[in-house]
Image (cartoon, helix red, strand yellow):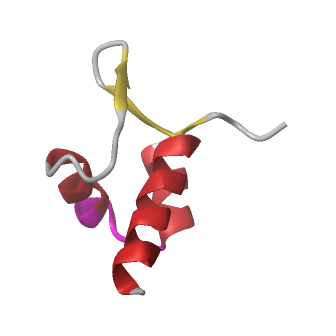
């Protein structure tokens, strides 16, 4: 079973971007994320899929 919530490191690997870029995307509202507990940020797989789909549509 694949995880439904990805860590920042996992999302970085999927998108092949730096930590800084990933946090910039989240802060700009381009990539949805949730906070679990006090400081644990997680990115839903569906948010990554939606972001990649949007990027592909804009590029076409």
**Percent of width and height locating residue 2:** 77, 41
| Foreground residue among 49 and 10 | 49
Q: Residue furthest left?
A: 28
Check if residue 43 falls in the magenta segment: no
Q: Which residue is pictured at 25% across the width and 48% down the height?
A: 26
Seen as rendered, the residue at the extreme bottom is 60
Tell me if 5 is positioned left or right of 43 in this view: right
- In the picture shown, does residue 36 fall above or below 11? above
Q: Residue furthest top?
A: 37
Q: Give the number of callouts.
A: 0
Give whichever of 17, 50 is nearer the camera.
50
x, y percent for residue 4:
64, 34
Q: At 18% across and 57% down in the image, what residue appears? A: 24
Q: Is residue 17 magenta?
A: yes
Position of residue 29 measured from the top left corner of the image (x, y, whole percent): 20, 46
The residue located at (29%, 24%) in the rendering is: 39
Quadrant location, the N terminus = top right
Residue 38: which quarter of the image? Answer: top left
Write down the region rendered in magenta. 16-21
Q: Where's residue 20, x and y in %? A: 23, 62
Which quadrant is home to the C terminus?
A: bottom left
């Amino acid at each position: 079973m694949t995880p439904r919530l990805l860590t920042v490191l996992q999302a970085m690997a999927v998108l092949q971007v730096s930590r800084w870029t990933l946090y910039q995307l989240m802060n700009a509202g381009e990539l949805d994320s949730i906070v679990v507990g006090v400081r644990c940020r997680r990115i839903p797989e569906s948010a990554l899929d939606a972001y990649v789909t949007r990027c592909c549509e804009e590029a076409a």
